[in-house]
Image (cartoon, rainbow, N blue to C red):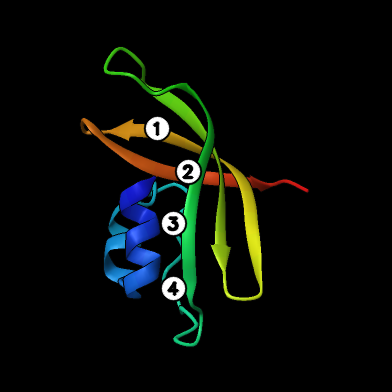
């Protein structure tokens, strides 16, 4: 999760696509170059240890002018954790 947040901060669409599950990954990702991310707070995690195949991370990512609150699902693919999808939270 933290590495994907860092990729959003840097505007690294390639990394984001590489760490997105092939089943749900978009063909391309257009990031807003004007977006200024200002912080990441991990609020909760479930599963996701070395003994799990799936896990969730609930987080709040702040940006200039607001924040994004999401529960993200991750799965292992060939031993690596990849983003599957997320549920926006209020």
- Asked if the residues shown at circle 2 and circle 3 are in contact, with their CB atoms under 8 angstroms apart, the answer is no
Residue holding disc 1? 75
Residue holding disc 4? 29
Of all residues, the one furthest to the top in this rendering is 51
Residue holding disc 2? 84
Q: State which tag comes first along the sequence, 2 or 4.
A: 4
- Asked if the residues shown at circle 2 and circle 1 are in contact, with their CB atoms under 8 angstroms apart, the answer is yes
The tag on residue 7 is none
Q: Distance between the Cα atoms at labels 3 and 1?
A: 13 Å
Of all residues, the one furthest to the right in this rendering is 90
- In front of the other: label 3 or label 4? 4
Q: Distance between the Cα atoms at labels 2 and 1?
A: 7 Å
Label 1: state its secondary structure.
strand
The tag on residue 25 is 3
Residue in the picture at 21% in, 30% down: 79
Q: In the image, is residue 37 above or below residue 88?
A: below
Label 2: state its secondary structure.
strand
Q: State which tag comes first along the sequence, 1 or 4.
A: 4
């Amino acid at each position: 999760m933290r590495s994907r947040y860092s990729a959003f901060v840097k505007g690294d669409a390639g990394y984001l696509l590489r760490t997105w599950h092939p089943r749900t990954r978009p063909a391309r990702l257009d990031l807003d170059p004007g977006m200024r991310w200002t912080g990441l707070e991990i609020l909760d995690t479930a599963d996701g240890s070395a003994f799990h195949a799936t896990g969730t991370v609930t987080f709040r990512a702040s940006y200039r002018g607001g924040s994004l609150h999401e529960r993200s699902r991750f799965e292992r693919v060939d031993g690596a954790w990849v983003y599957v999808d997320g549920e926006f939270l209020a």
